[in-house]
Image (cartoon, rainbow, N blue to C red):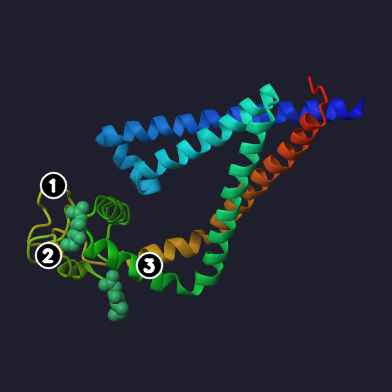
């Protein structure tokens, strides 16, 4: 029967793709954890993603969702397939929220970045802020938001000092007392550079978001088809 063939096909599609996603999630977790413990990998990862912690969190989310999808499809377990569809739907709703926020705030990007830098600089004692701004400063060879002098706003460094990540040649304490020393540090701020890079990449971010949303919505549709087939007591296998 056509329905049997179709439902079976959906089952294996869901299984196959979720198995791949599950492996990807696992790989992200492994890479993230390795980066947490290894300095070199950390430097590389941070350049691309901001923080190994972000990689681990994304990996764990993908791992769990794909696990439900993969096992649910294989065992034709309605509960797990439902869980998969619900979790995926929640992620899609969050993404839609982020996309709307992004659209609404697109004109305020510079303002938002300004605030972001301000928060990271004045809150430099918090690990997340420190890792984020250090990686930005290293990657884009810049210092502070508008200029290196922004660092005078933080209480968490010695007077007239910048983080070592501002240095042209990074060594321990190379930023101490160097807030205006253009020989030692990059004195140009990161704000204009990051602003430009984001604006240049916004098209690709939008395309990537659309592709991801398409894959996710396909996953939700397939899982609904499979759920119906399972619920109707149909022997999918
Ligand atoms: C950082 O400093 C702020 C304000 O001084 C304080 O409230 C916060 O607990 C500190 N955080 C850490 C991780 O030390
Ligand atoms: C950069 O300069 C603008 C305008 O002078 C100011 O509003 C903003 O707070 C500054 N940004 C940072 C991170 O200091």
Estimate the x, y position of residue 87 in percent, counting from the top left.
58, 43
Label 1 neighbourhood size at 10 Å, few (<14), some (14-19), many (20+)?
few
Q: Give the residue at mark 2.
A: 181
Counting residues from the start of the chain, the first of labels 2 and 1 encountered is: 1
Position of the C terminus, as image quadrant, is: top right
Counting residues from the start of the chain, the first of labels 3 and 2 encountered is: 3
Q: Which mark is residue 113?
A: 3
- The answer to the question of whether label 2 and label 1 lie on touching residues, with beta carbons closer than 8 A, is no
Judge whether 26 appears above or below 172 on screen. Answer: above
The residue mark sitting in front, 3 or 2, is 3
Name of the residue lying farthest toward the right: 1
- Residue 143 in sight from this viewpoint: no
Foreground pick, 49 / 124: 124
Estimate the x, y position of residue 221 in percent, counting from the top left.
73, 42
Label 3 neighbourhood size at 10 Å, few (<14), some (14-19), many (20+)?
some
Q: Which residue is painted at 63% across and 53% down in the image?
A: 210
Counting residues from the start of the chain, the first of labels 3 and 1 encountered is: 3
Q: Which mark is residue 171?
A: 1
Q: Which residue is painted at 41% across and 66% down in the image?
A: 195
Q: Which residue is painted at 29% across and 42% down in the image?
A: 43
Q: Secondary structure at mark 1?
A: loop
In the picture, residue 148 is in which quadrant? Answer: bottom left
Horizontally, is 192 left or right of 202 in the view? left
In the picture, residue 136 is in which quadrant? Answer: bottom left
Q: Which residue is painted at 52% across and 37% down in the image?
A: 62
Position of the N terminus, as image quadrant, is: top right
> Spatial distance from mark 3 to mark 2, Cα to Cα?
25 Å
């Amino acid at each position: 029967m056509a329905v049997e063939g179709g439902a079976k096909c959906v089952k294996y599609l869901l299984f196959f793709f979720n198995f791949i996603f599950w492996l990807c999630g696992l790989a992200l977790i492994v890479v993230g954890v390795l980066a947490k413990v290894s300095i070199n990998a950390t430097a590389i990862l941070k350049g691309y993603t901001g923080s190994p912690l972000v990689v681990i969190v994304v990996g764990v989310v993908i791992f769990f969702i794909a696990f439900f999808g993969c096992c649910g499809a294989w065992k034709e377990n309605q509960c797990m397939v439902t869980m998969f569809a619900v979790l995926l739907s929640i992620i899609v709703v969050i993404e839609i929220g982020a996309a709307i926020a992004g659209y609404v705030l697109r004109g305020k990007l510079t303002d938002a970045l300004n605030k972001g830098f301000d928060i990271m600089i004045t809150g430099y004692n918090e690990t997340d802020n420190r890792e984020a701004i250090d990686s930005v400063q290293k990657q884009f060879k810049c210092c502070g938001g508008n200029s290196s002098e922004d660092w005078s706003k933080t209480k968490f460094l010695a007077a007239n000092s910048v983080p070592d990540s501002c240095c042209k040649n990074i060594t321990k304490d190379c930023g101490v007392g160097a807030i205006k020393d253009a020989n030692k540090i990059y004195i140009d701020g990161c704000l204009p550079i990051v602003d430009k890079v984001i604006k240049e990449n916004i098209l690709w971010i939008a395309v990537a978001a659309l592709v991801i949303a398409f894959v996710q919505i396909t996953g939700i549709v397939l899982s609904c088809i499979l759920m119906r087939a399972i619920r109707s007591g149909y022997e999918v296998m």
